[in-house]
Image (cartoon, rainbow, N blue to C red):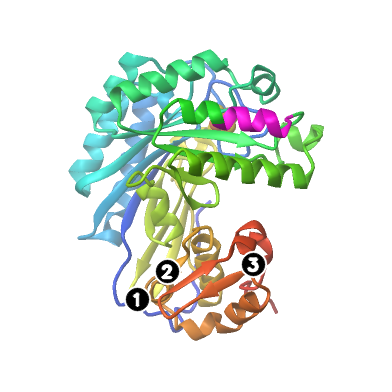
Amino acid sequence: MSSVVFEKPGRVQLAVLPPLALYVHIPWCVRKCPYCDFNSHERNGALPEQAYVQRLVSDIESLLPSVWGRRIASVFIGGGTPSLFSPDSIDALLSAVRARLVLEPGAEITLEANPGTVEAGRFRGFREAGVNRISVGVQSFDRAMLARLGRIHSAAEARRAIDAALASFDNVNLDLMYGLPGQTPDMARADIAQGIACGVPHLSAYQLTIEPNTVFWRERPALPEHDRCADMQVSAEEALAAAGYEHYETSAFAKPGMRCRHNLNYWEFGDYLGIGAGAHGKVSFPDRVTRHERIKQPRDYLEKNTLAGEKTVAPSELPFEFMLNALRLVEGFEVKLFGERAGLPLSTIEAGLEKAEAKGLLERNWRRIRPTPRGQRFLNELLELFLPDRP
Ligand code: SF4
């Protein structure tokens, strides 16, 4: 059912609209991983690729009036496992995107791929379709860890997938996780070392968290203690820095010039259209910031009106939403970005900034506001200082 909630626009004023990106969600996987709380569903037979691409195209068309004249800076095809779609379907999708939206020259176009679903020919097909960045979900190179995580691939298959991706793309990200059940700091270090040895220009290292509505939530596997996980994070940061990767966001590391532009746009509170089952989007106007959301269940998404909800974000929520993203950036953000993207004066967050400085969680000068190393480590404590007052 479609629900539309309108809030008073309040005092929000955006002099310039932010950059605009496009997120495309493909919601199927070969098997559901026990830790995964994404909108991903086990594939059951052949995927309805054509029908789904048609739905995606009608999503774009429904959004066109809200972004008239704006250009798309990046596209991210995520999931789920988008590499389950054929290169022909990705080609049809990207051609339809180009026919309806203006992409900036050299726009970054990422596709997520999982080992076990891709080989060299498929990567070449994705490149020919216009994809120019691949993100490979590996999570670990340790056989026992891969089995514990319910992954469908071996470490050798993961390495082959990365090599095949690097043969067709300069820009490849590798996702790893740490803090896994039964993982020791040495095992986590070995995973990072193997990730570095693959020669990818971008690496993401996420700490496993147990989320509601997952198998792990019900099973509660024993995870390494908090201090051990913190040690794993520190040793990953050290190893990656020594190998020439810049740590630019809580979990993201890149060789110079290889930061993910699409994700940077989220963290800088830019705009993005969300299309596909369960996708979220954010679109700004001169006097308000809006969010939209699509129906989650792939079957419902394919059969019904796909908009699940649309609302104007209450001005009181915007400071926290901005900080939730921007404080993930190791270098923080330029002072003027808050006014540009949240459309509110900096005085709205002054009390929070002062408290955060007093606690040693944040530092600032006339130009930038950034989390201190302590603020990065205790990010939730820092963010709580910017929560809106609830009645
Ligand atoms: S492959 Fe990725 S999206 Fe799919 S179930 Fe596993 S973690 Fe979730």
Q: Is residue 297 magenta?
A: no
Identify the residue under disc 3: 382
Q: Is residue 72 above or below residue 215?
A: below
Circles 1 and 2: CB atoms closer than 8 Å: yes
Q: Is residue 212 visible?
A: no
**Quarter of the rendering occupied by the C terminus:** bottom right
Callout 1 amino acid: Leu
Side of 45 relative to 224 (left or right): left
Measure the alpha-carbon separation of dots 3 and 1.
Answer: 26 Å
SS type, badge 3: helix
Q: Which residue is nearer to you in this view: 350 or 390?
A: 350
Tell me the residue at 41%/28% (across/down).
199
Callout 3 amino acid: Leu
Residue 69 location, x and y as percent? 20, 60
Give the overall secondary structure of the magenta segment.
helix
Q: Earlier in the sequence, mark 3 or mark 1?
A: 1
Callout 2 amino acid: Val
Q: Earlier in the sequence, mark 1 or mark 2?
A: 1
Quadrant in which residue 286 is drawn = bottom left
Residue 79 location, x and y as percent? 48, 35
Side of 193 relative to 98 (left or right): right
Side of 234 relative to 15 (left or right): right
Q: Provide the residue span drawn in magenta.
A: 183-192
Q: Nearer the viewer, mark 1 or mark 2?
A: 1
Identify the residue under disc 2: 289
Circles 3 and 1: CB atoms closer than 8 Å: no
Q: Is residue 184 magenta?
A: yes
Tell me the residue at 55%/29% (across/down).
193
Q: Which residue is nearer to you in this view: 89 or 190?
A: 190
Identify the residue under disc 1: 14
Measure the alpha-carbon separation of dots 1 and 2.
Answer: 9 Å
